[in-house]
Image (cartoon, rainbow, N blue to C red):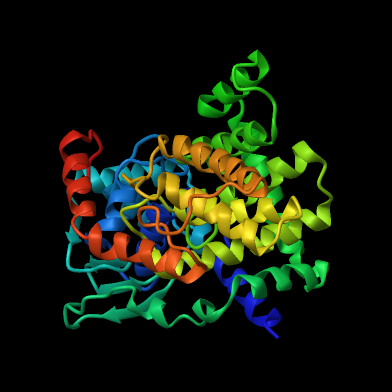
Amino acid sequence: MHTEFFLERMHRAIMPSTGCTEPVAIALNTATARANAKGEIRRLTITLDNYLYKNAMGVGIPGSDERGVALCAAMGITAGDAKAQLRVLDHVTPEALRAAKQMVYDGLVTVNTREDVHGLLVESVLETQEDTVRVLTLGSHTNIVRIDHAPFEPYVESQDDDALADDPIRACRLSEMAAFADTVPIEQLEFLQEGIDMNLAIARVGMEFGLGRAVRTLIEQGAIGDSPVSRAEELCAAASYARMSGMSMPVMTATGSGNQGITLLLTIEGVAQAMGIDREKKLRAAALANLVNIYVKTFTGTLSAVCACGVASGLGASVGVVYMLGGGEEQMLFAMQNILGSICGMICDGAKEGCANKVQLSSGLAVKSAFLAMHGMNVRGGDGIVGGELKTLFENLGHLVREGMESTNSVIVQIMSKGSDCPA
């Protein structure tokens, strides 16, 4: 009954991206503006919601040795392929990078933020000698909804994620998601293996430096041992650190985030490798994990003040691990309660190499939470904000994130802006 619906939702939520999706969304928007504008560039003005701005401030940009919101916006103009979606910066030449840096140096790029917008917003206005073009991205990283030529009215409508409350996946039960994972023809899940392979490729490179190498060394030295937990942590830490440093390799994303895609797919892969789980069981577990992730994000929103690698993708991965271990719906709920009872308050303080530490933590906790659940251990419903059933579990989380932490993101941006060496 739900097979086509669930497959469509997964295909819509999963796509490859080269680089962190927030600067890439900016570059895609400005590349689209450049593709629709005639004449020599005079000025580029870009306006972002505070959440997206936070995630683009200090993260590595593919093809660049420098960082910053203005630079990634300029790179969309000089190097971006507007038809390439989240792989817009796959082919950055040295000449294009120099031109983007010159735009920033010459003061041609202005960056603004809007605190009245709660959903994702990228608005660019590109002025040339012959034209003025505005491009508007709303709600999700690739959702370009308007391309206007002057004269046009300023965009003033406040966007939020209220539409997510009507998402039909909220009416689905965990048992229905698990039944889909059990019965969907396995050939229809092959795209998940493609995502696993893509994320494994960057993880292998990431094991040669940074956090990936450090975790591998700790395993080899016996400091953290070789286990399903450490195997998942190693893969996830390596892939995330490489990606956050700006490596020009694609990652399969989930719900608009490469780190979420890494956490979901490589946690499942790490456990499967460590325990000899067969390919079919692994892919069915990955499908279930992705559906749970999509479900959770309808409560927390596209971007938020909490780290979705823990409360959404790590949580989804934990359900997938329970599935691989042969657990049922009760154990899956236990695993989710264990996650939210542990790290529901882990903040998102922008995209950067330090995210890899959170991805490592989320991945390891996902595996441990699943094993604890299989032994009957859970953080019970009513313990703090932890709900006793699937819907209340995430209604509570969504209420905390969207109402309780409404001002948290602004404070995070203020702190980051004071201490950051990265130009806007």
Asked whether residue 328 appears in the rendered view, the answer is yes
The image position of residue 200, as x and y in percent, is 67, 42
Q: Residue furthest bottom?
A: 1
- The image shows a total of numbered marks equal to 0
Residue placed at 24% from the left, 60% from the top?
404
The image position of residue 367, as x and y in percent, is 62, 43
Q: Residue furthest top?
A: 221
Above or below 334: residue 225? above
Q: Nearer the viewer, residue 97 or 332?
A: 332
Residue placed at 60% from the left, 62% from the top?
290
Residue placed at 84% from the left, 50% from the top?
278
Q: Is residue 408 left or right of residue 97?
A: left
Q: Quadrant of the N terminus?
A: bottom right
Q: Nearer the viewer, residue 81 or 236?
A: 236
Asked whether residue 252 appears in the rendered view, the answer is no
Above or below 59: residue 300? below
The image position of residue 403, as x and y in percent, is 24, 65
Residue placed at 64% from the left, 13% from the top?
221
Q: Nearer the viewer, residue 192 or 5?
A: 5
Q: Nearer the viewer, residue 281 or 253?
A: 281
Q: Is residue 382 left or right of residue 204?
A: left
Above or below 39: residue 356? above
- Quarter of the image for residue 179 reads bottom right
